[in-house]
Amino acid sequence: MTKLPEQPDLALLAALGPEEHLLDAGTQCWRVYFKGGAHPTQWNSFRDFGPTGSRFDHHVPPRHSQTRAVLYGAVGHTAVATCLAEVFQDTRTINRSRRDPWLVVFELTREVRLHSLCGLWPTRAGASTNISSGPKHKARNWSRAIYETYGTIEGLYFGSSMNANEPAFALYERAVAALPLMPAGNWSLADSRLDSRLNAAGTHLNYRVWPP
């Protein structure tokens, strides 16, 4: 059996039930987003256009704007490096100016129920932790099935394949009410106050930081 089937067994998913990972109210969540470019966004914007090439988009094909929406980010003490690793993985360059990238941290206003892909659940469901690092189109199929099977689940909790399996998340639109009205912090990557943090992340990941 393949380590990541094209589609999950829906009956098996229903029988297993979700593997819940709770993000408590007050949890600090980090993300990198872009204020410029062809598709500018805001710090709290869930992307309703999809599915794109992102790993856990649960949108219904074909690609279009819809009621399903997603927001990617990270938690934990390495969250900033995780966000940078994921967002800039294609070029391995933390570009501080192109598309006007920003780093935001916000605190959840209520508990959020995520489905964890970090433990044994993927194996028990007929897959493996390859769901977080293997073919992305297959991972999207699994995300879609999880969303449709587990109506109380508000997103996915997974290990970043770009930062040593450090914790990351994909929030479904079901979690939109858990975001605050204002973030706890919001900085342009061009802000000199981020110099040391970005350079440390670049060294940690062996990514280039530009401009330095």
Image (tube, rainbow, N blue to C red):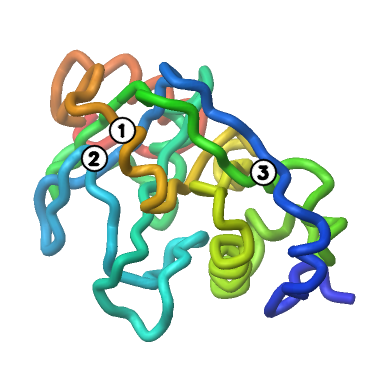
Front label number (1 vs 3): 1
Q: Which residue is mark 1?
A: 179
Q: Quadrant of the N terminus?
A: bottom right
Q: Which residue is mark 2?
A: 44
Residue at the location (58% across, 73% down)? 141
In this rendered view, identify the residue nearer to me: 174 or 156: 174
Taking 110 as reference, is 43 above or below it? below
Taking 13 as reference, is 164 above or below it? above
Q: Which secondary structure, mark 3?
A: strand
Which residue type does callout 3 highlight? Ser
Q: Which residue is mark 3?
A: 116
Is disc 1 surrounded by few (<14), some (14 to 19) or many (20+) residues within 10 Å? some
Residue at the location (31% across, 15% down)? 196
In this rendered view, identify the residue nearer to me: 180 or 160: 180
Which residue type does callout 2 highlight? Asn
Distance from disc 3 to disc 2, alpha carbons, whole Å, reads 22 Å
Is disc 3 surrounded by few (<14), some (14 to 19) or many (20+) residues within 10 Å? many
Q: Can the viewer see residue 136 in this picture?
A: no
Residue at the location (42% across, 77% down)? 60
Which residue type does callout 1 highlight? Leu
Q: Which secondary structure, mark 1?
A: loop
Query: Which is nearer the N-term, disc 3 or disc 2?
Result: 2
Q: Which secondary structure, mark 2?
A: loop
Distance from disc 1 to disc 3, alpha carbons, whole Å, reads 20 Å
